[in-house]
Each structure stands twice: as C-alpha cells, then as structure tokens.
Amino acid sequence: MIHAQQKGYSPAEVLRGLCNAVARNFKTSVVRSHAVVAPVAFIGGVAANAAVVRAMREAFELDAEQLIVPPAFAHIEAIGAAMTASASSQTANLAHMSELRAASDTAAWHFQPAGNR
C-alpha cells in the first residue's frame, strides 16, 4: 500500500487494490484448484465491505445471483464445525460460550493494543 501511495495512486485506487488482493489471496490460498459451483454464500465480517464483495465476484467470475451475501453475513453459525464436533467422540468444554456470545453481540468493536489486554 505504501509503495502504491509513493507511486501516486489515489487512496481509492490503493483500497481497490487491497480488496482485489484479499479476493485473489482467498482464491489462490484457500480455494486453490477446487471447483467453485454457484450459488455460493459469502459470509463473515468482510462480506460487509461492498468493495470486497465486488472483488470476490470478479475474481471468481460470479454475478450477484451466483455469489450471494446473506443479510446476516456477520453472525452465521459455524454449521460445519458443529457437524464435525457432533460426529466426534471427544467432548468440548462449553462453559464460556455465553461470554463469547455476549462479546460477539456487542454493538461496537474496540481495538486494544496487545499490551493492554
């Protein structure tokens, strides 16, 4: 980003490049050579960023009907993890689940430097 700024790119161009990099990195690092079959749901906090959504659609060559962003994109349960856990013979300690849920439901997120946690 700094290099792009030094070359004279506008902040909008730098941010667009960052969004494109997120999409390309996901495609090459996570998806790799696996087939992507539409429809695909794009979930998680980054799905709230319209520029990243656009970059993902471009990277995977999917339109709005093929790459879907559900309205509650940030709080979709980890169904796959739950299914895996239910098939496992191991038990989990869920004593802190209510605290984690309360923390995830807060209205604002605040950054705290590592030394202040």
Image (cartoon, rainbow, N blue to C red):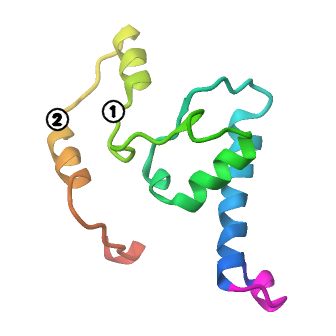
Residue that carries the numbered disc 1 in the rendered image: 77
Type of residue at label 1? Glu
Q: Position of residue 11 (x, y in %)?
A: 66, 83
Q: Which residues are magenta?
A: 3-10
Circle 1 packing at 10 Å, graded few (<14), some (14-19), many (20+), is: few
Residue positioned 59% across, 57% down in the render: 52
Q: Position of residue 54 (x, y in %)?
A: 62, 54
Residue that carries the numbered disc 2 in the rendered image: 95
Task: Give the foreground label among 1 and 2.
Answer: 1
Q: Is residue 58 left or right of residue 102?
A: right
Q: Foreground: 99 or 31?
A: 31
Q: Position of residue 14 (x, y in %)?
A: 70, 77
Q: Are marks 1 and 2 in contact (CB under 8 Å)?
A: no
Q: Position of residue 59 (x, y in %)?
A: 74, 46
Give the structural element (helix, strand or loop) at label 2: loop
Which quadrant does the C terminus fall into?
A: bottom left
Q: Foreground: 64 or 92?
A: 64
> Which quadrant would residue 107 be assigned to in this image?
bottom left
Which quadrant does the N terminus fall into?
A: bottom right
Residue positioned 22% across, 54% down in the render: 103
The CA span between labels 1 and 2 is: 18 Å
Type of residue at label 2? Ala
Relative to 78, residue 116 above or below:
below
Residue positioned 66% across, 23% down in the render: 37
> Which quadrant would residue 8 be assigned to in this image?
bottom right
